[in-house]
Amino acid sequence: MLEFEPITPFGARAHGIQPDAPPTPDEAEQLRAALRRNRLLLFRGRTFSEEDHVRLVSAVGTVRSENGQVVNYLNATPSRYIKTDAVAQERYLFHADYQMLPQGPLRVISLYGVKVDAANPTFFADMIAAERRLPDGLRAYLEARDNVQVPYHPRVKGDTKFRVSERPASFPYFRVSSLRRHSASGERYVSVSEFFSSHFEGLSEPDSDAVFRELAAIAYDPAELYVHVWQEHDLLIFDNEALQHARGRISGASARSLRRIIAHPVTMQALLADLGAFSTTYD
C-alpha cells in the first residue's frame, strides 16, 4: 500500500514505491488518483534508472517521445550545466509547457534530479486553486476575453514575456481561452501565463499588462506556491495542465542535470500539428 504525505500548500510525498519493480495495477491506480488529487508527487531518497523512471511515469499516463526520444535530459552534459554566466542566470517565468496550443498543454511532466550541486528551486503555482481565488470582477473579465499566446522562439529568453509584436515574421500565435477546463476533472483553471501570454484580445500590450499584474498577484502569490528545493535523486511527477512552473534566477556556483519524461494522450506530432511547419522547432 502506497502512502502519500501532504505537502504545503499542495502536492504529496509518495512513500512505498519500489523503483526496480513495476507498479502493480492497484499501485498504478493509487498513483493516478494521488496525482489527480494533489497535482504533484515527490519521490525522494530513492535512485531511479532510466528504465525505472519510464516505468513509473507509464503508470500515470502514456509516455511519449519528445525530441525523437522518450528520455531527455535538461543541461545533461558538463558544458551545458546551468552555470552563473551572463546567459544562464536569467529566471524562467511561470508557464505550462505547450499551453499556447489549441489542444491544451502537455498533460504530465516528470523530472528526476541526476545531478544537483545547489538548491536552485523550481516554483509551482496551482492554477485551479488560482481560479477559485479570483475576485468576481476579474473572473468575469477572463471569462469574456481570450488571451493571445506565442510559442517559443529564439528571440526570447526565459526571463522575457513572449509578445506577438516581437515574434519573427510569419511565426504563429494563438487565441486561448483565459479560463480553460481541465481535461480530466473538468475544473476550471487559469490559462494565462507570464511567459507565453502576449496580451488580451482587443487590448493593447500596456493595457493588458495592467490585467496581467492584477492576475499575477493572485496566481503567483508567494504564500500559495510550492517551492521545490532539489536534492539529487528527487523525482517529481506533476500535472502540467493544472500547474505552472518557474525557475528563479541562478545565484552562486551551481550545476544541475534533470532527466525529463512526459506523458500525453496523443503523440507529440499530433499535439504540435497546429504549429504546422514550425513544429520541427519543438520535436
Image (spheres, rainbow, N blue to C red):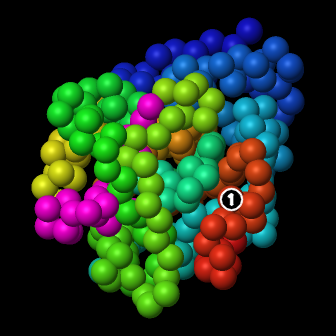
Q: Is residue 236 left or right of residue 155?
A: right
Q: Which residues are magenta?
A: 188-208
Q: Quadrant of residue 67?
A: bottom right
- Side of 234 relative to 201 (left or right): right
- Residue 11 at least partly seen: yes
**Quick one: SS at disc 1?**
helix
Give the residue drawn at x 44%, y 90%.
169
- Give the residue type that dot 1 points to: Leu
Image spot of residue 280 (x, y percent)? 67, 79
60 up-or-down from 34: above or below: below
Query: Where is residue 138 shown, x and y percent of the image?
Result: 21, 37
- The quadrant holding residue 162 is bottom left
Quadrant (top left/top right/bottom left/bottom right) for the C terminus? bottom right
Residue 90 appears anywhere in the view:
no
Residue 252 x, y percent position in the rendering: 29, 63
Question: Which quarter of the picture shows residue 233?
Answer: top right
Judge by depth and name the residue closer to the eye, 44 or 88: 88
- What's the residue at 26%, 35% (across, down)? 140
Q: Is residue 5 left or right of residue 221?
A: right
Q: Nearer the viewer, residue 281 or 12?
A: 281
Q: Position of residue 108 (x, y in %)?
A: 63, 43
Residue 48 counted in the magenta span: no
- Count of all numbered marks drawn on residues in the image: 1
| Front one among 237 and 200 | 200
> Relative to 151, is 165 above or below?
below
User: Dot 1: few (<14), some (14–19), or many (≥20) neighbours within 10 Å?
Assistant: some
Pick out the residue farthest to the bottom: 169
Residue hosting label 1: 271
Quadrant where the image shows the N terminus? top right
Q: Residue at x 82, y 14 (%)?
A: 26
Question: Is 173 or 257 nearer to us in this picture?
Answer: 173
Does residue 12 appear to the left or right of 264 in the view shown?
A: left
